[in-house]
Every structure is written in C-alpha cells, then in structure tokens.
Amino acid sequence: MGTLVMLMCILVGCFQAIGGMPPLERDLIELLEIARGRQHSTKNHRPSSSSSSSSASSSSSSSASSFSFSSSSSSASSSSEEEEVDISESGFPSISGPENFDDKIAIIGAGPAGIHMALKLKRAGFQNVIVFEKEDKVGGKSKTLTYRDVVHEMGTCYTQPDYTELYELLETYDAGNLIPVPGVTVWRGEVMIPGQVNTLIPVAQSLPENATVEDIQNAFLAAVNRYVTVHQQLFGNYSGELMPRPDENVFKKELNMTFLQFLEKYEAESLAQIFLQAHTIQGYGHLDEIPALYGLTWLTPNFLLKLLDPPPEEVSYIKLLSRGYQTVWEEIVRQENIDVRLSSPVRKIFRKGKKERGMRRKNRSEFTILYDNAYIYGRTEEFDFLILTPEMKLLSDLEIIDFNEEESALFEKMNHYYYATSLVDTTYGGRRGLTPQSYFADNVESKEDMKVWAKRDSYNSLVYNVGENYTKGLVPGAPDGKFIQTSVYYQFSKARPNETDLENELKTHIEDREEATVLNIRDVFIWDYFPQFSVADIASGITWDIFDIQGKHKIWYAGSSVYFESVKSVLEYNNLIFRQYRLPEEE
C-alpha cells in the first residue's frame, strides 16, 4: 500500500492537493477532453426530448444539471429568463397556479425554497404574497452564526459548479465574496490522506501490483468517462435539476437499483471514494443504500469534470460565502420588502369544503391558515393559493394539513435522515489534519449512528490556511489571535439522536481521535435531513408523479422533500414550476 500511495502522490502532487484540487497533468487533461468529446457526440436515446434538450443546453447552461462544459454567459441567462414562463419544456406537463395577480398567496417556510419562490412571484407581478416562518429568522437550513468575528455555517455551506441560479442571485443580493475551499483531509484510523489521493485508492487497488502511474490515471479517467457517457445516454441534456420523465425501460433497468449497483453495472465503482466525499459525506446517503436517481441527480457530469479539472485561475470550484449563506435570503427579504411573518408557526391549514369547527362560512377562500404570532395566539387568514416548502410528510404527521387521498399516496412514503451540526471550541490537540477540513471515512463506512463524519475549522477554511503551518498549529484560530480552534462538527444518524448521546460521542471523538480537549460546545442543531423515497418508489416514477399534480389542488409542493436536499435543487425546482406555469392574462 505504501508504494501505491507514493505513486498516487506523484500523480496528483501531494503538496498541491493539500492546498486544494490541483490542475491535472497534461495527459490527464487530454483524457478528460476525450471524455468530453465522447460525451458530446453521444445522442440522446429519447428522441421526444432531444430537440428541446439541445435548445436548453445552449440557452440555459446556467441550469443545475447542465451538460455544457462552458460557463454560462449573461446573455444566456437573459434568454432563459425570457422563456421561463412562456415556453413549456418538453417532457413536463403544463401546470396550473395562481389565477389572478391579486390572488392572496401563502408560502409556508422562509428557507431558501420559500424566499426564492416569493421572489419569483414578486418579479412575475404578484404583490399579495405572505411567507410564514416558525423561527425568528429567515433561512431555514441556511443557518449562519457569527462568533469570534468569524462566520460559521451550521447548515448550507458550499457552492459548486452547478449552482448557477444561486450565482445569479449573488449578483444582486450581496452575501460577500466567494471564497475557494481548501482540499479535504481524509482520516482512516491513524492515517491522514489528502482527499484527492483518497479518491484514487480504489483505482490503484483494482490494478495489478506492477501498475504504473499512467495505468492508474488511465483507469480513473476511463471510469469517469463511462459514468459521464452513460449519464448522457440515459438523460441527455436537460435544463434545471429534475430531468424529464424517463421512459419505462430506464425506470425498470437503470433506476430500479441503488447507486452503487448502478456504478457496478457500468464498471464505474472505482469512483466510490470520490463519491463518498462529494455525495455521502454531504448527508446524501450511502451509495449501496440510496436510489441511483439521487446519485445521478447530484453528481452530474458538469459537476464531476469541473471538480476534477478546474481552470488554472480557479483554486477550487467549491466555494464558501464570506458573509454566510443565510445572508442571501436575508438580503432578498430586505431589498425586495417581502412580507415574512417571523415567529409565526402555522398550527393548521383548513381547506375549502372541510367542515372544521369555527370554519362554517360557505364561500370562503381556498385555504384558511391558523397560526400564532408574538401578539395573538390562534390568528386566522384566508388565501387563494398555497405553497408548501417544509417536508410534506412532516406536515401531514403533525396534522398541519390534511392531504387528500392522491397527495397522501405520494407523501406518506417519504423517509429522512438526521444530520447534527455542532459549533465547538477545542484546544489544538495532538493530531490535526493536513487542511482545515477533515472527513472521517472510516466513521462513515462503519454506518454507526452519531459518528462524526466531518469537521470544518471555519476561520482557517475562510483564510485558506493549509500545509505545515496549519498541521503544526502555528496559526491562530480566529482574528482575535487566540490559539483556540472553533469548528463545525457533523454527525449523521438514521434514527433521531438523543442529544446527550450525541454530545458524548462528539466529546469522545475529539479527545480520542484528535487528542484535543473540548472547551465549549456552543450550539447544536439537529436537522431533519435528506427526505427521500425508496428504490422501488423511485422506479415507479414517484418524483415525476409529484410534479404532475403541481397546482391541481391549488397548491404548489416545493422544497427539498419533493426532490432533493440541496439549495441547487430547491431553486431549480422553483424555476421548473415557473417554466411550466403560464402567468395570468393582464386585465
């Protein structure tokens, strides 16, 4: 193994890898270009969507799952904006929505999905929109704390190459600078490995002992090429996050399996370690458990190739926001004067026709919302149209809304994980990573609940302190100059964790693994995370069935639970809703 690691260090340049994803060697770049060329020459296997896909690729390369490997231009973004409402995208049905510009519209949840939807409605001409939020701040899972004059991301944290909608928002709504993220340190027992080297270990292990560096890089790029090619063959070019509904053959033969089974089918399982870093540790499930669709959604060819081959001027395509993610949504609310009712939990949503106590007026609006605020317990307001962004099954389980039979048949099948984030002060300890971001791969692969999966030293990530100065603890942990490390720790569970057990597991990890002392656990957030469906449900087409009922019951179902848990996903899903909805006629 020592020889293999040494070979891989030569291949990727260990010292460069410690500081981030380095430019690849020339022959590696040439292989990537071959992969791209094959990908571009592959025809879409679904002729019904090929014409629109081609158009979408050229005019909307800003989409989350774009297969164009060039950057989006401002003119392309403008073109996409103009077509957004008027042109129905092939592969998706047209949907209904608010019928008049003066309709009173309620949005439940002031997270990214809710605030972005409110923004789109306002830009479209709707002025009577109210957002209800149970917390005292907007942002949802975009939770940014400021401590020691440093921003700490407790929820949403990174941007990546497919986040074009977010990048467009950042041009107007200032959340600071985009800061390149240092590469990761992967911990395996007592061994610490640069993240990029770790991605190549399965490739090296699959080859004979006498394999050369060139053999390793060729095998790795061949696996990348197979993945990129089959992704393109199955789904072609498409705009946005959710691809048009595949044909039944794709459902039965390609999506009726786990993501690992899919990789094995196309001899791309040697990519498992790069996907562990880019997918599993982000909280999106183990490759041998999650439906293939989720992996294919997040790990697009565009994302994968740019992750591996950033241009010389880019240290890394993965970025942090210097003022924090929560600032984006706060700025939208502030600049657009969006009506957000903070500290206003919705207790019940009454639907027209339901005979509820106190709701006897015959010709009331479609929905009556019962909610609390700081001044009134049990206030009601009526609305013509409803947009739901929290997890749908949770809304039903808490009896906030009574879904009808059609809705319940879809949403009752959801499940979710739990991802806990803790902001912790520690001593520097005897064992520090090569970089300020660490992934504990053996903990991930153990599949034990509450294990620490990752940590991020916030300050040193933002200022890009890496290498010997970081590892030896020669740099302070914040602008205050103190040698105290403040980090965000991530712990994953399938069952809701007990908070005491969670804290004990975290302390044990810090003391035993990092040989550090816990000084203070400042904040802990336990997130309901990554709502999902089973392999069988995905293979039945449930994701597209949900979209088919959008607007049918005077409701748009949005947010992470209707497709995928990422900012990219919820923004692009909102865009898809608007592409398929025709605005009311001007009176």
Image: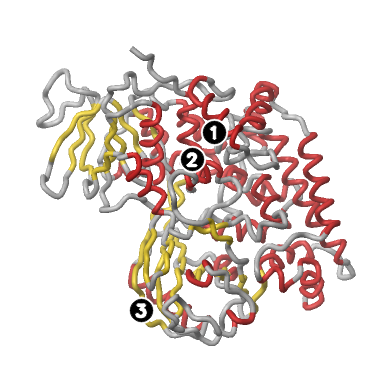
Q: Quadrant of the N terminus?
A: bottom right
Element class at badge 2: loop
* Residue identifier under label 3: 520
Q: Residues within 10 Å of mark 3 (few under 14, many from 20)?
A: few
Question: Which residue is depicted at the point 15% across and 30% down?
Answer: 356
How far apart marks 1 and 2 lie (CA) works out to 14 Å
* Residue identifier under label 1: 540
Question: Which residue is depicted at the point 76% across and 50% down?
Answer: 267
Which of the two discs, 2 and 3, sits closer to the camera?
Answer: 3
Q: Nearer the viewer, residue 397 or 35?
A: 35
Element class at badge 1: loop
Question: Which residue is depicted at the point 30% across and 44% down?
Answer: 397
Q: Is residue 496 visible?
A: no
Tell me if label 3 and label 1 are in contact, CB under 8 Å. no
Which of the two discs, 1 and 2, sits closer to the camera?
Answer: 2
Identity, as a three-letter code, of the amino acid under mark 1: Ser
Which of the two discs, 3 and 1, sits closer to the camera?
Answer: 3
Extreme top residue here?
A: 587
The image position of residue 490, as x and y in percent, is 46, 66
**Is 487 on the left-hand or right-hand side of 313?**
left
Identity, as a three-letter code, of the amino acid under mark 3: Asn
